[in-house]
Amino acid sequence: MPYFSFIVLGLLLFFSSGEKNNFICFFTDQSMKIDGHLDEWEHAKSINIEDDSRKSHANASIKALWDMQNLYIAFQVMDEDLQAKQTVLDHPQLYLDDMVEFLIDSRNDKESCWNEDDIIYHINLLGQKKDDRGSMDCSSNPKWNGNASYEIDLQGSLNDPTDTDKGYVVEISIPWKELDLDPVVGLKIGMNFAIGDNGILFDWAGASPFRSPDVFGNLELGNKIE
């Protein structure tokens, strides 16, 4: 096989393995207050996502931190028109609201199956969530309810299309117990992040459908920031 072909094959294997997205999550010994404000997040690394189709003008900066009790995620979303309607737990149309979404493959086994170690949360701007966990037969278990804590801070007015909003922040704390993991530096978990902008959905990993752990990126636990 020509040398060039080896290079192409290697690149294809690299990107198909989910390694194209690797997000370093630093350790924090600060007392994290989940209040929708990002005062404790100034040293955290961030990733950015936007809609490649350009149907949505919203975009997001996403940060992550960890300590021995929790994994922390913060979404800072720029959006000029904040919209949300659903106030019922696990409403099937919550995805049509402005919302954030995160998906975790805790064992990072990169399977196509939506398995028991895989969880998903959708959180809309009214503070309602839609979450589920995978099952042994690779289907969603909508009866599962997670214990993540979160707070939302709106920078604008909700459901008022006559003005121009700035966006919103969603700050989240996920117990390691929920993921059945013991955190340690170097641990990698499968991860995807998504944004819903009034029914337009886009994500970090380019998964289709979003519940596709085989193409998730990696969130890697790093050391404390010095």
Image (cartoon, helix red, strand yellow):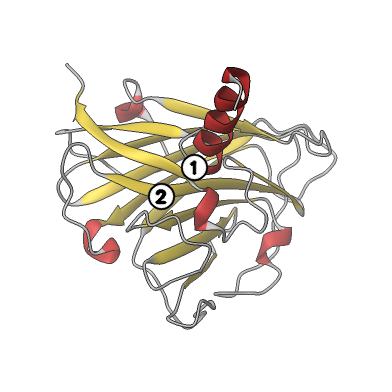
- The residue that label 2 is drawn on is 190
First in sequence: mark 1 or mark 2? 1
Q: Position of residue 45 (x, y in %)?
A: 38, 24
Q: Is residue 76 above or below residue 5?
A: below
For the residues labelled 1 and 2, say whether their Cβ atoms are less than 8 Å apart. yes
Q: Residue at x 68, y 42 (%)?
A: 157
Nearer to us in this view, 211 or 130: 211
**Is residue 50 found left or right of 18 in the rendered image?**
right
Please name the amino acid that badge 1 sits on: Gly
Q: Quarter holding the C terminus? A: top left
Among the 4 quarters of the image, the one containing residue 50 = top right
Q: Which residue is mark 1?
A: 18
Q: Position of residue 153 (x, y in %)?
A: 51, 42
- Whole-number angstrom distance, CA of label 1 to CA of label 2: 9 Å
Q: Name the image quarter holding residue 117.
A: bottom left
224 and 197: which is toward the camera: 224
Dot 1 surroundings within 10 Å: few (below 14), some, or many (20 or more)? many
Task: State the SS at label 2.
Answer: strand
In the rendering, at what x and y percent does residue 21 appear? Answer: 49, 34
Residue at (84%, 39%) from the top-left corner?
Answer: 55
